[in-house]
């Protein structure tokens, strides 16, 4: 997989670039991601913080928990990134906002302790009750 990736929000106001392989990719089942996205899961790629840049626009942010800050488009509301103090040298990007999300391979499930009981997705992937950093 390429080391150069780009993505952005729905309205086009925000764009980002990542210069790293996207090999740490997980389906997150936590209730915070569900409420922030309005979806049943959010799929994240964790990349080195220094490989990520905002290429266009300025995101808004808010602290969604004691350890996490989420970045989103102030115009369309799309959630694009998450920073956690639990892993201060990395940032997570939402796979769905990549220009080519179909090129990414999901590796695991995280926060399955709060998974919706009726959701069955990629059952062959390893599962973590919370998340192993």
Image: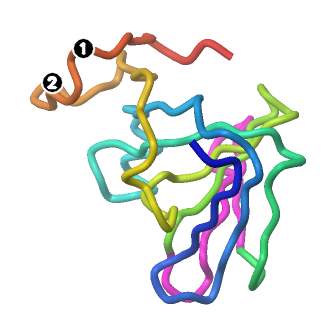
98 and 26: which one is in front? 98
- Tell me the residue at 47%/31% (across/down): 26
Instruction: Find the magenta span and give its range.
Output: 60-77
Q: CA distance from mark 1 to mark 2?
A: 17 Å
Position of residue 106 in the picture relative to residue 115 (left or right): right
- Tell me the residue at 72%/50% (across/down): 69
- Tell me the residue at 72%/64% (across/down): 17
Residue that mark 1 sits on: 124
Quadrant containing the C terminus is top right
Residue found farthest to the left: 118
Is 65 covered by the magenta stretch? yes
Residue that mark 2 sits on: 117
| Percent of width and height locating residue 98 | 51, 62
| Percent of width and height locating residue 106 | 41, 32
Position of residue 39 in the picture relative to residue 105 (left or right): left
Q: Nearer the viewer, mark 1 or mark 2?
A: 1
| Percent of width and height locating residue 76 | 49, 84
Give above or below for 104 relative to 70. Answer: above
Is 70 covered by the magenta stretch? yes
Q: Secondary structure at mark 2?
A: loop
Give above or below for 29 relative to 100. Answer: above
Q: Secondary structure at mark 1?
A: loop
């Amino acid at each position: 997989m390429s080391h150069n990736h780009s993505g952005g929000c729905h309205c086009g106001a925000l764009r980002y670039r990542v210069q790293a392989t996207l090999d740490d990719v997980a389906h997150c089942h936590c209730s915070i991601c569900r409420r922030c996205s309005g979806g049943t899961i959010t799929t994240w790629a964790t990349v080195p913080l220094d490989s990520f840049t905002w290429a266009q626009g300025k995101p808004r942010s808010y602290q969604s928990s004691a350890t996490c800050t989420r970045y989103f488009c102030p115009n369309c509301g799309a959630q694009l990134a998450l920073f956690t103090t639990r892993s201060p040298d990395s940032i997570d990007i939402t796979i769905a906002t990549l220009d080519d999300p179909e090129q990414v391979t999901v590796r695991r499930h995280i926060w399955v302790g709060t998974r919706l009981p009726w959701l069955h997705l990629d059952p062959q992937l390893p599962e973590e009750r919370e998340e192993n950093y």
